[in-house]
């Protein structure tokens, strides 16, 4: 298993990862209507492509197959964090989260934040994130509850 930078051409596979995570993993916490609003069967391809290129996520691969992806913005915000439903409980999420923490340290980020689904909240909590606020964003006319979660990172004192 390895982590690599996003490459042009990854966009369609990353959408498949998101779609599988939403429809096969988050399905226990959301209605079919919410799942379809969150991850429609077909994305608006141009919009999705531009979004991924702007986010510049990093990609987890197992034997050359994309198993998950996440990003970390310079502000400390994690916009996307998804593991494919085809790779459950294989350490992909932990590896992505470890990479986020390593990148945050390199960037000097002191706080991580993310809008986290009900399904992913226990995972984020295991890494020290706490719920700051319950949120009720609307996508395609459908409310999809989540929570803003935050983790304050410790900084090393200058020597």
Image (cartoon, rainbow, N blue to C red):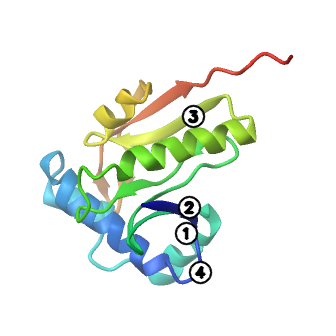
Instruction: Indicate which disc, 1 or 2, sits on the residue closer to the N terminus.
Output: 1
How far apart are the alpha carbons under marks 1 and 2? 7 Å
Considering only vertical position in the picture, is 135 above or below 100? above
Number of labels in the image equals 4
Pick the residue in front: 133 or 149: 149
Under circle 2, the secondary element is loop
How far apart are the alpha carbons under marks 1 and 4? 9 Å
Q: Quadrant of residue 25?
A: bottom left
Instruction: Indicate which disc, 1 or 4, sits on the residue closer to the N terminus.
Output: 4
Please provide percent x and percent y for residue 150: 50, 28
How far apart are the alpha carbons under marks 3 and 1? 20 Å
Under circle 3, the secondary element is strand
- Please tell me which residue is depicted at 34% across the width and 49% down the height of the picture: 91
Say which residue label 4 marks: 8
For discs 1 and 2, the disc positioned in front in the rendered view: 2
Say which residue label 1 marks: 52
Say which residue label 2 marks: 57
- Please tell me which residue is depicted at 61% across the width and 41% down the height of the picture: 102
How far apart are the alpha carbons under marks 4 and 2? 11 Å
Say which residue label 3 marks: 112
Mark 1 vs 2: CB contact within 8 A = yes
Please provide percent x and percent y for residue 116: 39, 41
For discs 1 and 4, the disc positioned in front in the rendered view: 4
């Amino acid at each position: 298993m390895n982590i690599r930078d996003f490459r042009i051409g990854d966009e369609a596979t990353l959408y498949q990862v998101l779609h599988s995570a939403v429809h096969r993993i988050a399905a226990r916490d959301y209605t079919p209507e919410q799942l379809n609003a969150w991850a429609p069967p077909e994305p608006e391809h141009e919009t999705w492509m531009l979004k991924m290129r702007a986010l510049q996520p990093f990609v987890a691969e197992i034997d050359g197959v994309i198993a998950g992806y996440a990003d970390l913005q310079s502000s400390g915000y994690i916009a996307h964090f998804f593991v494919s439903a085809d790779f459950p409980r294989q350490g992909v999420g932990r590896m992505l989260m470890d990479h986020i923490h390593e990148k945050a340290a390199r960037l000097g980020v002191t706080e991580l934040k993310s809008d986290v689904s009900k399904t992913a909240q226990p995972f984020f909590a295991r890494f020290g994130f706490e719920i700051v606020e319950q949120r009720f964003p609307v996508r395609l006319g459908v409310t999809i509850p989540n929570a803003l979660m935050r983790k304050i990172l410790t900084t090393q004192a200058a020597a």
